[in-house]
Image (tube, rainbow, N blue to C red):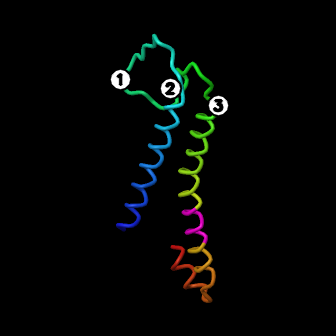
Amino acid sequence: CGLLVLVSWIMCILNSLLQSLMMLRLSFCSHLHIPHFFCELSDVVQLACSDTFLNNLVIYFAAVLLGGGPFAGILYSYSKIVSSILRISSALGKYKAFS
């Protein structure tokens, strides 16, 4: 459990560091007014005066990686559970396991 928490913290820190470093390469116009106090990353990227293609690419790649990785792990886990249940020889055992 501790290792899972540690890995999730490290992934969050690395993602935040990556996004922060990607923001450093952008240039912003001098007179910008943000009407709210919470700045979402995609909103701040849209305010940049320089090219934001690489930033958008990194944002979408990180979202797919951080969302798709755990989803693939969950699907793999459930497929292993279902395959082990299907290897049970008796019909009553399968019924009990699926219920």
Q: Are marks 1 and 2 in contact (CB under 8 Å)?
A: no
Residue 4, quarter of picture: bottom left
First in sequence, mark 3 or 1: give its number: 1
Q: Which residues are magenta?
A: 73-79
* Left or right: residue 72 compared with residue 3: right
Residue 31, quarter of picture: top left
Q: Of residues 92 and 49, which is closer to you in this image?
A: 49
Residue 25, quarter of picture: top right
* Amino acid type assigned to the residue bearing label 2 in the image: Asp
Q: Quadrant of the N terminus?
A: bottom left
Q: Of residues 36 and 44, which is closer to you in this image?
A: 44
> Mark 1 Cα within 10 Å, few/some/many (few <14, many 20+)?
few
Q: Would you place residue 35 above or below residue 78 in this image? A: above
Residue 53 - label = 3
Q: Where in the figure is residue 17, as x and y percent of width and height?
A: 45, 43
First in sequence, mark 1 or 2: give its number: 1
Most common SS among magenta residues: helix
Q: Is residue 26 magenta?
A: no
**Residue drawn at x 45%, y 13% as measured from the top left:** 32
* Amino acid type assigned to the residue bearing label 1 in the image: Phe
Q: Distance from label 3 to label 1 (Cα)?
A: 25 Å
* Amino acid type assigned to the residue bearing label 3 in the image: Phe
Instruction: List the residue tagged with mark 1.
Output: 37
